[in-house]
Amino acid sequence: KQEVTQIPAALSVPEGENLVLNCSFTDSAIYNLQWFRQDPGKGLTSLLLIQSSQREQTSGRLNASLDKSSGRSTLYIAASQPGDSATYLCAVLGGRRALTFGSGTRLQVQP
Amino acid sequence: DVKVTQSSRYLVKRTGEKVFLECVQDMDHENMFWYRQDPGLGLRLIYFSYDVKMKEKGDIPEGYSVSREKKERFSLILESASTNQTSMYLCASSFRDRGHEQYFGPGTRLTVT
């Protein structure tokens, strides 16, 4: 059974810092990996989708990498801003059609 | 833009009531999903549907049923609500091809008293 782990569970950084969020998964037979953002009490917003054949994807200040063989992904956020404060979730799509989620990293960016 | 909408943002129901949560997507997606999210447990799949009238159980289907009579609409039904079904419910949809991303609705916070 696929398990997804995110480290750290919580992170607090001053504004302007570059930061890395980590995601690992136990079964490397995945179709893709998605990173989401969730604000308190809200739904999930898709940030980046990496196909299993890809190594990385970029969107603005966000860069996500995927090393499928080692079961790892990282989300890099450049020049963090207070508006980046949210919970970031990693999820993988394997043999079944639904995603398996990590428990998330709660990020706070201090002004 | 893909849009997934859910019928209510907040809902308060009494124990034993029958509860309907509705989800509608406007992108002609084949797949639709219902998850629940609880502190410390993360997001867990309740049911999903890959076509009209087709459904498959997820990880925690007990106490729930679903209905998909039209492609754009997927309903989650709590036949007899219980307090342990108090949770945030999230609907999602995607194309059948596994290369596509899932899009989520805004969520329904259900409280059962």
Image: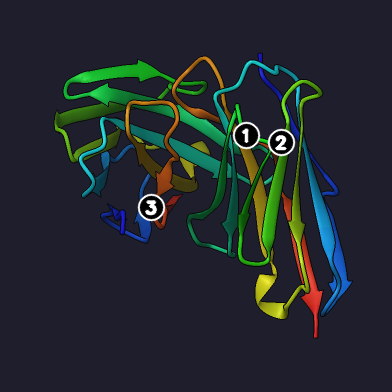
Name the residue carrying label 2: A66
Write the residue at 35% across / 37% down.
B94
Name the residue carrying label 1: A54
Between residue B45 and residue A97, name the one nearer to us.
Answer: A97
Q: Which amino acid does label 3 sit on?
A: Gly
Q: Which of marks 1 and 2 is nearer the N terminus?
A: 1
Q: Do the residues labelled 3 and 1 touch (CB within 8 Å)?
A: no
Picture coordinates of residue B49, whole percent (x, y): 30, 25
Furthest residue in direction bottom, as rendered: A111
Q: Is residue B113 visible?
A: no
Label tally: 3
Residue A83 sits in which quadrant?
A: bottom right
**A67 displayed left or right of B24:** right
Residue B55 sits in which quadrant?
A: top left
Give the number of the mark in front: 1 or 2.
1
**A35 displayed left or right of B31:** right
Picture coordinates of residue A88, whole percent (x, y): 67, 54
Q: What secondary structure is found at the residue carrying circle 3?
A: loop
